[in-house]
Image (cartoon, helix red, strand yellow):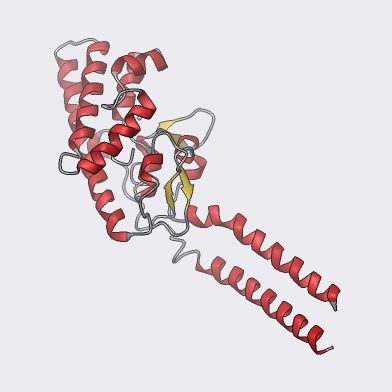
């Protein structure tokens, strides 16, 4: 009888292990493109089944860690943050206008890079004009990441990438991990920098680092086709739950028989 109980326990442990390994794929069901397959997004977020969109900031992330303390299962909070981030994405269109105007004026690539990079930082700070706490978090994140509370300077990015063209690209880019936490990963997927070593895109704040798509040609949102862990993947949850319950019943019956004997 002890052997029966041991076997049942081993089966339950195996099922629970299977369930734990399935969690990342389960959370990835929120999107057509898997954020965890994007190295830079994965560096900033963790799979969180309780979060509204299946992901939350990684406490150890230099960029998003300061936002991990918030409750990402709070729908009202996430909705507010999502709206603010959408407004940020919309405001980035101004950078295209600056770039095109300066190009028409014959400005150099370096001059354009410095202008759009500086304005990008200003836009991000302006997003928090009515949110002192959020502004403090952003500046803390900037300080940890760039050594400058206002964000990475054009010179910082030039030293890092060695190209003013790349500095311009970085000015138009967005943080993929932040978008994943806010249900926007698919919508802005085509705006992330593509890493040649992966089929997924890469980048690097909740309020708000890519070969930018034209503002009027942003990729369509995948909201209508995405599979949510709470809907489309229900069959997986049902199967796993059933296995766990079956294991529990087997163990219970075996234990009861052992006591009666």
In this rendering, the answer to whether 236 lies above or below 169 is below
Instruction: Determine whether, in the image, residue 79 is placed left or right of residue 107.
Output: right
Q: Residue at x 28, y 32 (%)?
A: 139
Q: Residue furthest bottom?
A: 260
Give percent across and percent down for residue 24.
54, 52
Q: Residue at x 35, y 55 (%)?
A: 223
Please identify the quadrant where the N terminus is shown.
bottom right
Nearest the eye: 243 or 136: 136
Q: Residue furthest front?
A: 259
Give percent across and percent down for residue 245.
63, 76
Q: Residue at x 44, y 59 (%)?
A: 50
Nearest the eye: 45 or 89: 45
Give percent across and percent down for residue 130.
15, 43
Please identify the quadrant where the C terminus is shown.
bottom right
In this rendering, the answer to whether 224 lies above or below 168 is below
Nearest the eye: 67 or 126: 67
Q: Residue at x 44, y 39 (%)?
A: 44
* Residue 189 seen in render: no
Give percent across and percent down for residue 186.
38, 47
């Amino acid at each position: 009888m002890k052997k029966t109980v041991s076997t049942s326990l081993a089966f339950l442990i195996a099922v629970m292990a299977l369930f734990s390994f399935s969690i990342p794929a389960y959370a990835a069901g929120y999107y057509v493109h898997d954020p965890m397959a994007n190295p830079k997004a994965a560096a900033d977020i963790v799979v969180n089944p309780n979060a509204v969109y299946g992901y939350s900031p990684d406490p150890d992330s230099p960029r998003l860690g300061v936002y991990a303390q918030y409750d990402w299962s709070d729908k009202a909070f996430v909705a507010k943050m999502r709206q603010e981030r959408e407004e940020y994405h919309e405001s980035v269109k101004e950078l295209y206008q600056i770039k095109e105007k300066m190009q028409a004026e014959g400005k150099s690539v370096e001059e354009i890079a410095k202008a759009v990079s500086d304005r990008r930082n200003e836009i991000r700070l302006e997003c928090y004009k009515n949110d002192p706490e959020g502004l403090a978090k952003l500046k803390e994140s900037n300080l940890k990441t760039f050594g400058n509370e206002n964000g990475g300077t054009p010179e910082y990015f030039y030293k890092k990438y060695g190209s003013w063209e790349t500095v311009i690209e970085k000015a138009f880019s967005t943080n993929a991990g932040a978008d994943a936490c806010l249900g926007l990963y698919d919508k802005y997927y085509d705006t992330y920098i593509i890493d040649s070593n992966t089929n997924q895109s890469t980048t690097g704040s909740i309020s708000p680092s890519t070969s930018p798509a034209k503002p009027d040609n942003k990729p369509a949102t995948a909201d209508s086709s995405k599979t949510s862990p709470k809907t489309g993947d229900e069959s997986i949850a049902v199967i796993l739950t059933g296995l766990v319950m079956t294991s529990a019943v087997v163990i219970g019956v075996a234990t009861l028989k052992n006591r009666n004997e």
